[in-house]
Image: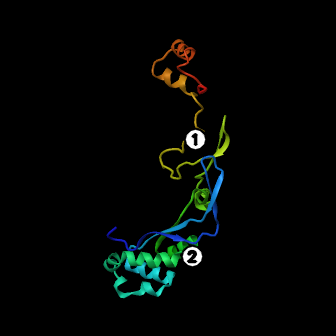
Amino acid sequence: DTEMAPHGVYRTRDDSGRWAGDVLGNPTEEYHDTWLALAVDSDEAWRALCDVVGDARLARPEYATTAGRLAAQREIDVVLGECLRERDAAEVATALQAVGVSAMPVMSALMLVRDEHLAARGYFPTVLHPEAGEHMTTQPVWRLADRPQPPLQPAPCFGEHNRVILSAVGYTDDQLAALEGEGILATVPLKA
């Protein structure tokens, strides 16, 4: 970006540790991986970032302007990477946001599910599926003023809407029965 310097994602401290798993979900290794995304869009935001980070290496006069920071982007990234590596992403993001710097922790799926902001907006509702049972899903958080919120429905079961859809495009009940009799249409998957 030619207007924001620095901007990027920086590794931060992660004390929470999570388990990485194989395709079956079996834990294979613990990992620590937390990041902070930030973007400085003005000289004022740069000064605010410097105050929050508190590292004298960022106070160089040539970093005072966007042009200077763009020219030194790699050097600044190294310093920020070192400074932020041992700090908590959420704490730094909160401090930066309070002084007008765009910043947010990069959120894992687990962090998203636990996020108060998304929860308050009903982003993770629970649905009841006839085969899979009750489970959490996602839905858009935006609301259109002139349209009602569509009802939340579970995913359809295998072949659940075959008859409705094919009837709508002209198939008769006799034709559908014939297709079902031949195994072309089904409501259960074929066994391998």
Q: Given the image, on which type of amino acid does mark 1 rest?
A: Pro
The quarter of the image holding the C terminus is: top right
Residue 128 x/y as whole percent: 66, 40
Relative to 43, 152 lies left or right:
right
Q: Residue furthest right?
A: 133
Residue 169 x/y as whole percent: 45, 22
Q: Which mark is residue 19?
A: none
Tell which tag, 1 or 2, sits nearer the viewer. 2
Q: Say how the picture is coloured.
A: rainbow
Taking depth in this image into account, of 1 and 124 the one nearest to the observer is 1
Q: Which residue is mark 1?
A: 151
The quarter of the image holding the N terminus is: bottom left
Q: Given the image, on which type of amino acid does mark 2 rest?
A: Arg
Residue 42 x/y as whole percent: 38, 76
Identify which residue is drawn at 43% across, 82% down. 47
Identify which residue is drawn at 50% across, 84% down. 54
Identify which residue is drawn at 57% across, 59% down. 108
Q: Upstream in the sequence, badge 1 or badge 2?
A: 2
Give the secondary structure at mark 2.
loop
Q: Which residue is mark 2?
A: 87
Residue 21 x/y as whole percent: 62, 53
> Image height check: is 134 above or below 95?
above
> Image height check: is 112 above or below 46?
above
Taking depth in this image into account, of 184 and 40 the one nearest to the observer is 184
Pointer 1: residues within 10 angstroms few (<14), some, or many (20+)?
Answer: few
Relative to 94, 136 lies left or right:
right
Q: Residue furthest front?
A: 28
Give the secondary structure at mark 1.
loop
Pointer 2: residues within 10 angstroms few (<14), some, or many (20+)?
Answer: some
Identify which residue is drawn at 54% across, 42% down. 150
